[in-house]
Amino acid sequence: MPTSRCDEPPRAPIRPGSVAGPFRSNLSLDPGTPPVFVNSNSAPSAAPLPKMVLHVLNSPTGGAALSTLGLIAEFKRRGIRSCAVCDTAGYEADQKVLSDAVEGRSLATKLYWTNRKIRSAPWKRPIHEVRQLLQTGFQRGSTGKVVESARRWGADLIHTNTIVTSEGALAARQLGLPHVWHVRELVGPGQPTRLPFEGAKFAPFMTRYCSKLIANSHACAALVRDIAPPGMLEVVPNGIDLSRFTPRGQYQRPGKIVVAMVASLTSRVKKHSLFVEAAALVDRSLPIEWRIYGHDPSRGGTVPADAYIAEIHARIARAGLRDRFAWPGFVEDPRAIMSDIDLLVHPADEESFGRVVVEAMAAGLPAIGVRGGGVGEIIRDGETGYLADPDNARQLATGIQRLVSNAESRQSMGLAGRQRAESTYSLEACATGVARVYEMAMLRPLAAATSDRSRAAVSS
């Protein structure tokens, strides 16, 4: 099973084939601690774990999908079976990976995305809205397919793995099932993701359509903490399969020191140009090879590309660094990337989590990031790497230069990163936290409602 993707070359698209129960909260003040439930030492819950979980995903591709695949695999080892309904966005090969993970119990169908802030010009957004309303049967059809899937496979809990689709919530309410909603996005005014039920509307909507709400980072939780129903929200960091990564034994290698950024070149929020700006500020006498991983449709700046990619190459040329930048392209396996670099730099400050940073730590590499989003709570400044202020290329350059100049610091921070990954970001720790949330959700199944009432609540 793959663990990371970075802007793959184009592939074929997928073809669609009253509330009761106690709440308990896990909002620790320390973002560096693993999930600890405040009543974890109390008597065991009377509710059993679910036997079959229906996972609803908005794409089979990307970090949220990879986290869900990890949970599915770990739950299978613990005797919890899974099935899935997934939007047709993404790639056909990834849809097959998901289908194989749930032993064929999967359905690819168009789902309605409530995210108002999408990557298109404002004048195009009404066109997208009409199109997806027609494709989902005004959400009535897509919700019906989730209901049918839950019945067919005997789901006793629905887990929606993104905040931007609501079919799982509507289906759970129709069926009277527990519903766990996973917020893996930075949501709200001024954030990358906007929802129709923000502010004062958020708590009543969640009270009706959600049994428990999980945030994958404290950065995500902070944006909904004050508007979520009391006790509904839990923080469970994403986990990765650490057994796939082997920390480097000998850190000092011959040749140049490879400083890399691993991020999709189609995503403007990753801030590749900031990485280039920092590179231009680093002492040029240091033996550094700079790398940007990810599919580059401009072929290293030799053919026309969109404005974002063109600007990255233009900045490299203006800095006189063309001969020091390498473009390895898309690499399927993150282990291959981490075994071939010495230092990861991740300048994005709008990440809800930061999976690639955990992958670097799992491989025993130090990482440099920013004090913003999920990355700022993964990296421990001065212990597992360095943190810079958002958009501060000089601070990024200072951190890079310190680590490039000192092999012992790279090794000690890399080992500390591996230890932090083991204590906080293992797949086992994540699955244990989510399973505990499932136990609490099973005590709070949603009250059954007609589909008309459910749709009215979503559109209000």
Image (cartoon, rainbow, N blue to C red):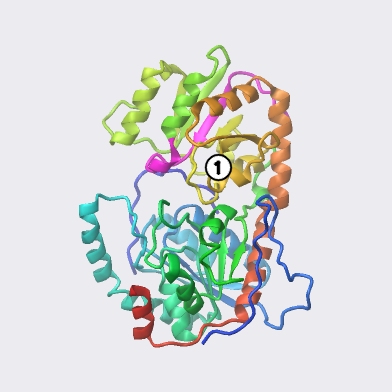
Residue 53 in picture, x, y percent from top left: 55, 74
Q: Alpha-carbon neighbours of circle 1 within 10 Å: few (<14), some, or many (≥20)?
A: many
Which structural element holds mark 1? helix
Q: Main secondary structure of the magenta part?
A: loop
Whether 416 is among the magenta residues is no
Q: Quadrant of the N terminus?
A: bottom right
Q: Which of these two is toward me, 159 or 231?
A: 231
Which quadrant of the figure has residue 384? top right
Residue 142 in picture, x, y percent from top left: 35, 74
Q: Quadrant of the C terminus?
A: bottom left
Residue 236 visible at all: yes
Q: Which residue is mark 1?
A: 334
Q: Which of these two is toward me, 123 or 204?
A: 204
Above-or-below relation of 305 to 359: above
Q: Which residues are magenta?
A: 248-271
Q: Which of these two is toward me, 414 or 370?
A: 370
Residue shown at 34% from the left, 24% from the top: 314
Above-or-below relation of 91 to 299: below
Left or right: residue 28 versus residue 110 is: right
Residue shown at 37% from the left, 66% from the top: 196
Left or right: residue 443 versus residue 397 is: right
Residue shown at 63% from the left, 41% from the top: 379
Above-or-below relation of 168 to 246: below
Residue 282 in picture, x, y percent from top left: 53, 19
